Image (cartoon, rainbow, N blue to C red):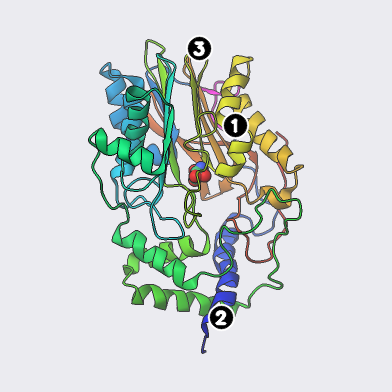
Amino acid sequence: MEFSRRDFIVTATMASLAARARGQAQSSATPGAQPTRPPVQTTGKGFGTGRPPILVSSANGWNGIDIGYQMVRDGKDTLDAAIAVGKVQEDDPNDSSVGYGGLPNEEGVVELDSSCMHGPTRRAGAVGGVRNIKNVALLAQAVMNNTGHVMLVGEGAERFGYAMGFEKMNLLTERSRKTWMLWKETHSNQDWWGPGLDDPNWQANAQGEAASAQLQEEIYRRLEELAARLGIEPEYRQVAIEQVLHPPHGTIHCSALNDKAEISGMTTTSGLAWKLPGRCGDTPIIGAGCYTDQDVGSAGATGSGEENIRVAGAHSIVENMRKGMSPQEAGLDVLKRIARNFNNDQNKLRYVSMNYYILRKDGAYAGVSMWSGRLDRPSRFCVHDGQKRLEPCVALFQGTDLPYPPRTPQPRPNVPSSR
Ligand code: ASP
């Protein structure tokens, strides 16, 4: 079959159905009929309780959380420990959501965001849109420690970083560059331009009927060919194609509490893949991506940054706990506020991915998510209190979120849980 570039652009957008179909077939063949997963193990009060020292992070904190836990055990500062967890992923060229190797913006330039709060001294630091420094969580901490400001962005943040001795480097790995090239080549009008999910006139799709199975296969074959031509390694091609069709999120958050009840938090990210240059999500926003109050606890977020900014998620959670809610109740309440912002319209909410990681000053903790995730890949978070483990998030809705922007007609959303 011959494809013109225009055909390819139009049909590539429809190919996302193939990917979705693959994912959804495994999650909920009949929307609304997905079995409820077993409840999370809790103390019976609706939240987990760990003994300090304890660290709570997004699931991708798994590789670094041992280091952070040991630091806190050794009496090191809680913020240093939380940042050390993030740094492991920032340094990893194979983590395409954070630091070096993060997927770039639409111009092929990696832009990183981070924020942190130090409970004991009640200070905060943040950086946004940093292009050539990989350890932006440390850079946010340097803003906190070495300036009278809280937040620096773009070129100013970088120049400050170089003055502080941070290394200048190209953050785009060959793999991320090639994936960006693949996106660029298949790029259509399905990008981050145009009205977003919050637009009152937003429509789920304008693509008409689903592509035929034959066409879907053809699109995939075409993308695979293109990926091979670009030199993307065979074992990475499938991932790259998914990243092109469904621009991924990805972020790491960690909160750390020591046995003196000192608590701190940090969040770091490369943000949304293929974003508009200069776009900052929730991660560098104190109160959205990260918030810590020494009197109460700490919270952080990963997921749809724009939605989280609109509810000042991390701050709202900490304030909820201040008023007496458990970590789980505090997190679910904020997820409900996001749902309320869409008038509980499931046709929109299914495009919202949102996770919160919550640690109270007494060691009580929770991970909550908007969607429970696929049965074979549930939404989880990481805890270390001497025993490192992944626990399932408590979800507001059962089912999977869908990648945004939508490109094809979608089946009806799953039924909300009774929570
Ligand atoms: N919240 C991040 C952002 O919007 C992305 C993510 O967590 O996946 O930039």
Q: How crowded is mark 2: few (under 14 residues within 10 Å), some or many (20 or more)?
A: few
Determine the secondary structure under disc 2. helix
Q: Indicate left or right for 293 with 226 as reference.
A: right
**Of the residues under marks 1 and 3, which one precedes in the sequence?**
3
Q: Earlier in the sequence, mark 2 or mark 3?
A: 2
Image quadrant holding the C terminus, namely top right
- Left or right placement of residue 22 versus residue 177 in this view: right
Circle 3 is placed at which residue position? Answer: 295
Give the residue at mark 1: 312
Mark number displayed over residue 6: 2
What is the x, y in percent for residue 325? 63, 19
Tell me the element at label 1: loop
Front tag of 2 and 3: 2
Residue type of the residue flagged with mark 3: Asp
Up-down: is 233 above or below 198?
below
Q: Magenta span: helix, strand or loop, mainly?
A: loop
Q: In this view of the protein, which residue sits in the foreground, 229 or 127?
A: 127
Q: Report the magenta residues as a range.
A: 40-48
